[in-house]
Amino acid sequence: MRRQAVIGALLLVCVGVALGTTLFRSDIAHATGLAPTVATTDGKPVKSKSSGPNSRSLTLEYLNGGDDEKFTSIKASALTIQGDTFGSTTWLYLLSAGQLVSYFYLQPSERVVLSLPKPIKIDEVNLANCFGSIQCFAQVNLIGS
């Protein structure tokens, strides 16, 4: 009897973890601030982006398909990238005029801080894949001119 109760409890915990990492992942990301949103006047949430002439900050979300963010080009002299903190390996591409500039294969929770010796022009960031889940996030900050 006791063995069945332990197995039942473990099964319940496993189901809860599975639901938490799949169905409620977006809610968890929003609650922890990994996927910040702002509300528009119609009440629909949109991704939060801050930008200026010398910087670009993006939060990308992959959900059963990539997330591609295009913007006015920036000559980046430094960048920071935060990989998914929920356990997925992510593929992130930096592009300029449709051409690949740089590629990052980020392990779960990996953070890249890179100062570039020569500024590179970037006008698109693509979160192309996440391994280990159907949903993942990446935070990208480009600093330049």
Image (cartoon, helix red, strand yellow):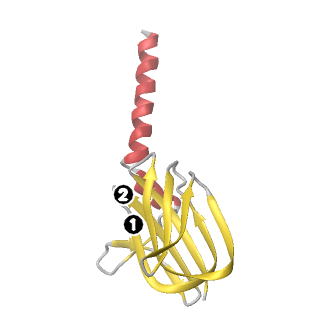
Q: Secondary structure at mark 2?
A: strand
| Residue at 62% from the left image edge and 69% from the top image edge | 80
Instruction: Indicate the quadrant containing the N terminus: top left, top right, bottom left or bottom right.
Output: top left
**Residue type (three-letter) at the residue carrying disc 1:** Asp
Instruction: Indicate the quadrant containing the C terminus: top left, top right, bottom left or bottom right.
Output: bottom right
User: Would you call the spot at circle 1 few (<14 residues within 10 Å), some (14-19), or many (20 or more)?
Assistant: some
> On the image, numbered disc 2 is attached to which residue?
63
Answer with the quarter of the image where residue 144 lies. Answer: bottom right
When the figure is inspected, residue 104 is found, relative to residue 99, above or below; the finding is above
Relative depth, front residue between 18 and 95: 95
Rendering coords of residue 105 (x, y %) = 54, 57
Q: Secondary structure at mark 1?
A: strand
Rendering coords of residue 102 (x, y %) = 55, 69
Q: Horizontally, is 26 left or right of 92 in the view?
A: left
User: Would you call the spot at circle 2 few (<14 residues within 10 Å), some (14-19), or many (20 or more)?
Assistant: some
| Residue at 41% from the left image edge and 56% from the top image edge | 26
Residue that lies at the very extreme toward the top in this rendered image: 1
Q: Horizontally, is 110 left or right of 31 in the view?
A: right
When the figure is inspected, residue 87 is found, relative to residue 92, above or below; the finding is above
When the figure is inspected, residue 7 is found, relative to residue 124, above or below; the finding is above
Relative depth, front residue between 19 and 62: 62
Q: Are marks 1 and 2 in contact (CB under 8 Å)?
A: yes
**Residue 27 in view here:** no
Rendering coords of residue 134 (x, y %) = 38, 50
Answer with the quarter of the image where residue 4 lies. Answer: top left
| Residue at 45% from the left image edge and 32% from the top image edge | 13
Rendering coords of residue 57 (x, y %) = 53, 76
- As drawn, the label of residue 6 is none
When the figure is inspected, residue 86 is found, relative to residue 41, above or below; the finding is above
**Residue type (three-letter) at the residue carrying disc 2:** Leu
**Residue 76 in view here:** yes
> On the image, numbered disc 1 is attached to which residue?
67
